[in-house]
Amino acid sequence: MPRSSDILKLTTVRAATELTASYVEGTVIECGNVNQVSLFVAYTMGAGETSNSIEIKTEFKPFGGDSYYREASSDTVRGTVTLAPIEYSFAAVSAAGTYDNFVIEVPANCERLKVSAKETGKATNFGTCSILANASTA
């Protein structure tokens, strides 16, 4: 458990704004010497919607690097490891207009972390999302 002295200030990655069907990047997080970033996500579907999801992707810029890299997950079958980019998907559980709050813990041994969000399943009205980040050195 990190001590309060190990936790850096809360950063707004994305203010509460309307989502789109394409990924929209939030404020890039300067990670410096942190080991982990907690993303606090508040998401609500748009009015009249019933089965939407929010999708979050993370991209990492290494120290001294120029490019961003996606986090990957792996699946091993008969000795073959298949990698796929990680995309965090959260299906709304509350009624439209009511916020679902959840946390994503992201490893952050990098110079910068980029967080992007989009919504899927929209019929008529996009929902909204806000994302806050807390970084920890422990």
Image (spheres, rainbow, N blue to C red):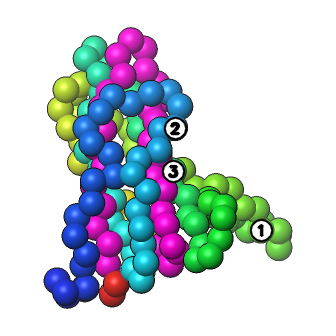
Whichever of labels 1 and 3 marks the residue nearer the N terminus, that label is: 3
Q: Which residue is mark 3?
A: 57
Mark 2: which amino acid?
A: Tyr
Q: Quick check: 34 left or right of 95? A: right
Tell me if residue 56 can be seen. no
The numbered mark, 3 or 2, whose residue comes first in the sequence reads 2
Q: How far across and down, in percent of the image, does residue 54 sit?
A: 41, 38
Q: Are marks 1 and 2 in contact (CB under 8 Å)?
A: no
Identity of the residue drawn at 47% across and 44% down: 25
Q: Relative to residue 34, is residue 96 drawn left or right?
A: left
* In the image, residue 39 above or below residue 52: below
Please tell me whether residue 33 is drawn above or below residue 44 in the rendered image.
below
Q: Split into 4 quadrants, where in the image is the C terminus?
A: bottom left
Find the distance from the CA under tag 1 to the CA under tag 2. Answer: 27 Å
Tell me the residue that label 1 is attached to: 81
* Residue on which disc 2 sits: 23
Span highlighted in magenta in the image: 108-136
Mark 1 vs mark 3: in front? 3
Marks 3/2 in contact by CB < 8 Å: the verdict is yes
Give yes or no for residue 112 being in the magenta stretch: yes
